[in-house]
């Protein structure tokens, strides 16, 4: 099941993100996001637990901040379902950054019509480069 996240989901989102990414967003940032009316976060629930999330800011355009699915629940279409929630409410272009070596995420985005338009060198704190991807 996919549903809109509330402030009560902040800890679960943080715990999943923090276990997957080396440089995940601080809990306080996620709490502020969940209170922001222009931020749209969704969580995936299976087996009575949160197993994934996506967050995006929707202003004149839509910027996807992060998406993640717990390892044991991947490759079952959950990432696609989360992304589709943002595509339903999107405004203008949809943009995102992704590590150039993150083949799984790049394939997910390409499958949903995103195209790489430029590379951002040293975009991440560990020096990794990012692709900037866009869906019109
Ligand atoms: C990226 C991520 C969210 C995808 O979630 P998911 O639930 O596995 O995605 P889906 O099952 O919906 O897969 C959708 C498509 O993505 C691609 N894909 C996802 N995982 C893949 C893998 N291991 N190998 C190859 N392609 C993959 C495929 O094109 C797939 O479509 P298909 O099943 O029709 O072949 C997940 O791998 C993840 O959480 N990764 C770690 C966090 C991360 O890197 N987030 C992105 C930050 S920019």
Image: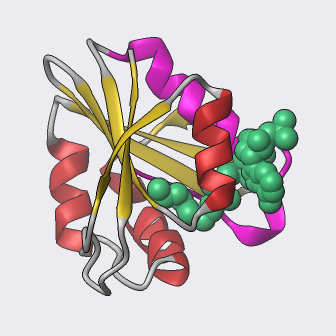
Question: Does residue 14 lie above or below 91 as drawn?
Answer: below
Q: Position of residue 116 (x, y in %)?
A: 44, 38
Residue at x 45% of width, y 63% of height: 13
Question: Does residue 12 lie above or below 87 as drawn?
Answer: below
Segment tinted magenta in the rendering: 65-90
Quarter of the image containing the N terminus? top right
Between 36 and 67, the one nearer to me in the picture? 67
The reply, left or right, for residue 122 in relation to residue 117 is left
Q: Quadrant of residue 110?
A: top right
Residue at x 15% of width, y 39% of height: 36
Q: Position of residue 79 (x, y in %)?
A: 66, 44
Q: How many marks?
A: 0
- Inspect the magenta stretch and tell me whether residue 62 lies in it: no
Residue at x 68% of width, y 66% of height: 70
Question: Does residue 87 lie above or below 75 as drawn?
Answer: above
**Can you see residue 89?**
yes
**Can you see residue 50?**
no
Between 37 and 23, the one nearer to me in the picture? 23
Q: Position of residue 49 (x, y in %)?
A: 68, 60
Q: Quadrant of residue 113?
A: top right
- Inspect the magenta stretch and tell me whether residue 70 lies in it: yes
The reply, left or right, for residue 106 in relation to residue 86 is right
The reply, left or right, for residue 49 in relation to residue 18 is right
Q: How is the image coloured?
A: secondary structure
Q: Position of residue 93 (x, y in %)?
A: 30, 19
Quarter of the image containing the C terminus? top left
Residue at x 28% of width, y 13% of height: 91
The reply, left or right, for residue 34 in relation to residue 80 is left
């Amino acid at each position: 099941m996919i549903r809109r996240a509330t402030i009560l989901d902040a800890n679960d989102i943080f715990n999943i993100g923090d276990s997957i990414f080396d440089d995940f967003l601080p809990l306080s940032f996620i709490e502020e996001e969940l209170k922001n009316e222009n931020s749209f976060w969704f969580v995936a629930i299976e087996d009575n637990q949160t197993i994934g999330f996506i967050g995006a800011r929707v202003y004149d355009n839509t910027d996807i901040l992060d998406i993640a699915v717990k390892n044991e629940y991947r490759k079952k279409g959950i990432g696609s379902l989360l992304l589709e929630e943002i595509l339903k409410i999107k405004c203008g272009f949809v943009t995102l950054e992704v590590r150039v070596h993150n083949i799984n995420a790049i394939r997910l985005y390409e499958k949903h019509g995103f195209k790489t338009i430029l590379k951002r060198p040293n975009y991440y704190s560990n020096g990794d480069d990012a692709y900037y991807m866009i869906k019109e």
